[in-house]
Image (tube, rainbow, N blue to C red):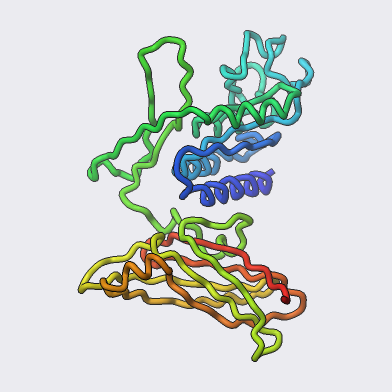
């Protein structure tokens, strides 16, 4: 159960990183039986809170869909009114109790699904056999949204998580929104993925835009030349002495190999050349050796000032 929770959290965090630079509100549909927030002596609440924070920071609303469909009234798999769960429940109103609350435990996984959906302003869909209909309802829910924002003063950035509440004067309106925010004084290294994560993530990171291509090195059989182009617009550069300065790390990892090669590039662009670099980007390349049936190379670019990253997987195919 612990490994199931870790795998789920890592996938949700990868999705958040992948979507972070996509503008506007995003919807993430999670089809799963999930897992309970509490399992025997384990409490997954802190980890799920952290996953919810990263989804919120990326403006992602999570929609949890239970694929088990309608469950039997006596099997603990339904939320409709019955002997175990008295009262009338709708999909909008359902809020499964935590394990141990009330007379009966929540159906397995409902608490985690509702917890994450509530934290991020999404919805939870349960007790319905029409999974296609539920997926469509989740997609449609984000069609019309309002974006509200505020900016705490620097002295209020205390590194503490604060609750959020949104209210409207009109009666009968159902509001869904993220439930909290972290008043972080500044971005920290923990807010950005480590190189190891970037090399193994299934999804590409989009914080820094890059493109890469590989071709056989004719002068060195068994080797490939990997050319990389980095978009300057995704980098944080300082301006001083009539130059834009910064630095990037460009890492290369061949599929199946243990070694990672990293090139560090210092950036110093004169003012009169900056427009050209904005248009054309920064180019670099590396010749890599492959063994056996290596089929791809992973390329990762990280901004040395902020830790923001971009990544891409390049197939190694003979022409």
Q: Vertically, is 185 above or below 305?
A: above
Q: Residue at x 73, y 31 (%)?
A: 67
Q: Nearer the viewer, residue 135 or 111?
A: 135
Direction from residue 237 to residue 88 in the image, left or right: right
Q: Vertically, is 202 above or below 225?
A: above
Q: Position of residue 48 (x, y in %)?
A: 55, 40
- Determine the image quadrant of residue 225: bottom right
- Determine the image quadrant of residue 103: top right
Q: Locate the N terminus by quadrant.
A: top right
Q: Position of residue 93 (x, y in %)?
A: 56, 17
Q: Vertically, is 117 above or below 219?
A: above
Outermost residue, bottom side: 219
Q: Position of residue 52 (x, y in %)?
A: 51, 40
Q: Residue at x 37, y 17 (%)?
A: 168
Direction from residue 257 to residue 265 in the image, left or right: left
Q: Nearer the viewer, residue 74 or 295?
A: 295
Q: Locate the C terminus by quadrant.
A: bottom right
User: How many numbered circles does the render carry?
Assistant: 0
Q: Residue at x 29, y 44 (%)?
A: 157
């Amino acid at each position: 159960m612990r490994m199931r929770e870790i795998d789920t959290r890592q996938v949700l965090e990868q999705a958040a990183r992948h979507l972070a630079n996509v503008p506007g509100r995003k919807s993430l549909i999670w089809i799963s039986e999930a897992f309970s927030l509490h399992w025997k002596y384990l409490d997954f609440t802190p980890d799920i809170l952290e996953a919810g924070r990263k989804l919120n920071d990326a403006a992602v609303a999570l929609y949890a869909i239970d694929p088990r469909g309608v469950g039997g009234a006596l099997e603990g798999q339904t939320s409709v009114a019955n002997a175990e769960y008295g009262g009338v429940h709708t999909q909008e109103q359902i809020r499964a109790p935590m394990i141990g609350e009330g007379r009966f435990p929540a159906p397995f996984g409902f608490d985690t699904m509702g917890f994450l959906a509530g934290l991020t302003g999404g919805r939870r869909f349960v007790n319905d056999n029409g999974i296609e209909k539920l997926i469509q309802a989740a997609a449609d829910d984000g069609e019309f949204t309002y974006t509200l924002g505020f900016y705490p003063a620097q002295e209020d950035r205390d590194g503490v998580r604060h609750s959020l509440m949104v209210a409207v004067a009109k009666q009968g309106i159902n509001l869904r929104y993220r439930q909290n925010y972290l008043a972080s004084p500044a971005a920290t290294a923990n807010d950005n993925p480590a190189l190891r994560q970037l090399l193994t993530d299934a999804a590409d990171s989009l914080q820094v835009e890059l493109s890469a291509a590989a071709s056989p090195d004719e002068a060195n059989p068994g080797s490939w030349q990997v050319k990389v182009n980095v978009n300057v617009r995704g980098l944080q550069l300082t301006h001083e002495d009539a130059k834009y300065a910064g630095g990037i790390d460009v890492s290369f990892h061949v599929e199946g190999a243990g070694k990672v090669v990293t090139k560090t590039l210092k950036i110093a662009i004169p003012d009169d050349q900056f427009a050209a670099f904005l248009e054309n980007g920064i180019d670099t390349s590396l010749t890599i050796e492959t063994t056996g049936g290596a089929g791809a190379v992973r390329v990762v670019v990280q901004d040395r000032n902020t830790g923001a990253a971009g990544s891409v997987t390049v197939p190694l195919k003979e022409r």
